[in-house]
Every structure is written in C-alpha cells, then in structure tokens.
Amino acid sequence: MGPLVTTLPLREYFSDAATWRYLKSVFLYPLYWNLPGVFEQNLYSSSVNGSIWTIPYQFGFYILLGVLGFLGLLRYKKVNLSLFAVFVCAYLTSDNLFPNVTHFLGIPLKEWLYLGMYFTAGMAAYAFRDRIELSRRGAITCLTLLLFAWIAEEYYLSVSVFGTYLILYLGYCTKPVHFSLAKLSFGIYIYAFPVQQLFTHLFGGSMSPYLNMLLSVPIVLLLAWLSDRLIETPATKMEKYVTLEPLIPEKLSRAWGQLRAAWERVLRRLAGISWGGYAAVLLLTGVVVWAAFFNLPSKVDFTSTRHQPSRVLVSGYYTQNKDEPFVFVTDSSCIHLGQKRGMTCLEIKGFLPESFTDVNSVSVYFNDAPVLADGELIPGQVFSFSLTVPDHRMLMEKEVSVQIVFNAVHEREPDNTDIRQLSACITSICIKKN
C-alpha cells in the first residue's frame, strides 16, 4: 500500500532508509510506525499501523506463559492467582519502583506491569473457570462496580477484575458476539488501522468517523477472512510438525526426565499448602508491600540524587539534576509526607540564589492551615524554618500536605533562555519529633 499512496517519487521512496527500517518491525522490539510520504496529511498523521502497539507486550507475555507451562506451574490455581497478585502489587507500586521512565526491550517498564495485570487476570480466570459462573446478574454487578470505579477515578485495577468478567460474559454468553466472525477478530485488529488510514487519505486527510467505519468495515472483514484462510489457519496446522524431541540426545533426554520428576515432587509439596495458609502468605506479603511502598516518607532530602515517587512531589518542583544537591521550586509548591505519632516539628531547609532579588518572603501551609506567614528570605543566604504543626496521627491521618508559597518568581534576564518559573532552592523537608 505504501508505494501506491506515498507522496514521494517511487525511486525516492524505495531509496529512503525509513522504508526498509520499517520492515524491522517484524522483530517487534522496537516497532516502527511510519513510511516516508505515507499518510503524512492525515488527521492522525504518518502512522501506518498504530493499532499493533500491543503486540510486543502480547508476545512477551506469551513467552512468560510458555516458561510457566514448561515448568509445569500453570496447572496450579495458586500459581496463577499469585502471578496476578504480583502484577497488581507491581502496578500499584510502580511510581515507587520506577520513579523515572525505565525501559525493558525498548518499552516503558510501567506499561509491562500495567498490561501484565490484565493478562494475568485472564490467566487466573482460566485457572478458576470451573468456579466462575458467567451470568447476566454477575455482568450487571460488574458493570455497576466499574461505573463506581470510573467515578472514583480508580478504574485500572477494577477493569482487570470486573472488566475481565464482562469480556468473558460477552464472549461466551451473548449471541451477537459469540458467532463465527469471532474467528476473524485478530485479522480485524491487524487490518483495521491501515484501511481506515487509507480511506482518510482518499478523502483528503479528514473525514467523518461514521463514514470511515461504513466504508472500512466490509474491506477489513474481507481482509480478515482472507488472512484467516491463507495465513492463520495454515500456520496453526503446522503445529504438529514443530517438535524438538528428535534433535535431543537420549542421555540428555533421560537426565531431563529425572530432573523433571524431582521438580514435580517439589511442585506437589508446594501445591499441598492449604488455602488458609496461602491466604495468610498473601496477606503477609500485602502488609510488607504496603509498609515498603505505600507509607510516605517523613523526610525528603534533595542533597541526595535519589528521585522521589510522583505522589510525594505533587506540584511546583522541577526535575533534579544529578550534580545539584537541591531542587528548584516555583512560587507555589506542594509535597506529600508521612507523619508518625509524636512528630510535630516541620523543618524546611534551602537557600535563595544571589540573583533572586525579587523573592523576599515565604509562607508555609500544613494541610491547608497556615503555620508560617511571610518568613523573611535574603538573597544569597540559606534559610531554615522549624515550625510546630498539629499531630494528625491522632486523627488517623498519616498523609499530610506541605505547601510552600513564595511572594514572587525570579525575573530572568531578556537573553536568558531558561523559561522555568523559579523562586528558590529547597535542600530538605521533613517532619520530626521536637
């Protein structure tokens, strides 16, 4: 399709390195989205195959599935449930685990955890398929709970549980979904995006989404049917020819059999743990994870280059450079800290650069209550405030908000290209006992 719609001359199109680099997407890590001169004028410009962004994750999770199956773990319900619990905990603590953007195989690690939660939810549902009853009442209940979760803005975890049930109900218990076209679902997923982009291109780069769907659906269904007949079904029939057993030496095969038997004995012993003991282990693990990752620190020290999770530094803070023992803040910055019983002293340390002559005072609010009004600041000097704050632990409120408000921001020189709104530098903030 690329040569037919590109705006470049064919010689230039085929000599462009991006054309051939696009073929590297077959290796999945990384994916390439654009072809030179293709769909560049579209409303959703350039991307040829945007919908397949999930395939690298899917393939990675299939490898995980294969490893677990090879080890004989998938037949144990507790293993499937534990894997789901691991991904849920990892997702909930991802800001603490990976405060900075961390990649694995060229993909943000947080997205592996986020999508893994959904994948392992499906694994757990399959493991407990003999216990899960799909019914209209259950579907309505899950839909209602999802609506409440959406209102509460906590729907990602909820979708992994209630959304999984709804998908299974729609797939197995409703005639409009559970029919022969369901076999074409993967082909529809693959071909829909480029076909929709093609029609958008033919209509000048923008068109009604309803007209786009009306024109695209028949073409996509045809392509999906051809793909199923010519590619997917023949590929699955090759499964019986793919085997490594004839290539494995007899001695190695015998040694593997003995190792597998020993591993099976270990698995049977582990599987013998009661559901009560299993629940106790999960509960203890949950408590440890909560204590390690969900309790907010009572001190943030910027003299160290250790980055803080996003829920600690709420607003008004700029990214800390590795060679700076402080962080720049704007005229109003907010931080969340944890307060333990008896901690009633709030300590704030920092300094004002010499050139920040516009800034001369600061006010501090503790849970929106003023604890310092117009504290004096002197350019070129450090400042340190020790303020008495109420012990909110007595009210079972251990997460507190500290807001620092300066009277102005530094007016930069006309030739200064730094566009940040800076007011001061903070070195540490903590709540401690008097």
Image (cartoon, rainbow, N blue to C red):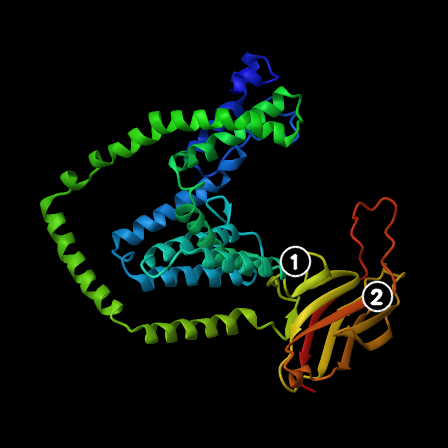
Please, is residue 371 above or below residue 158 in the view?
below
The residue pinned by badge 2 equals 406
Label 1: few (<14), some or many (≥20) within 10 Å?
few
Q: Secondary structure at mark 1?
A: loop
Numbered tag placed on residue 341 in the rendering: none
What amino acid does circle 2 point to? Phe
Please, is residue 36 above or below residue 30 in the view?
above
- Give the residue displayed 55% in from the left and 59% down from the top: 144
Asked whether the viewer can see residue 21, the reply is no
Label 2: few (<14), some or many (≥20) within 10 Å?
many
Report the side of 72 relative to 336 (left or right). left
What amino acid does circle 1 point to? Asp
Expressed as whole percent of the image width and height from the top left, the position of residue 163 reads 49, 54
Numbered tag placed on residue 323 in the rendering: 1
Q: Quadrant of residue 386?
A: bottom right
Expressed as whole percent of the image width and height from the top left, the position of residue 160 reads 48, 56
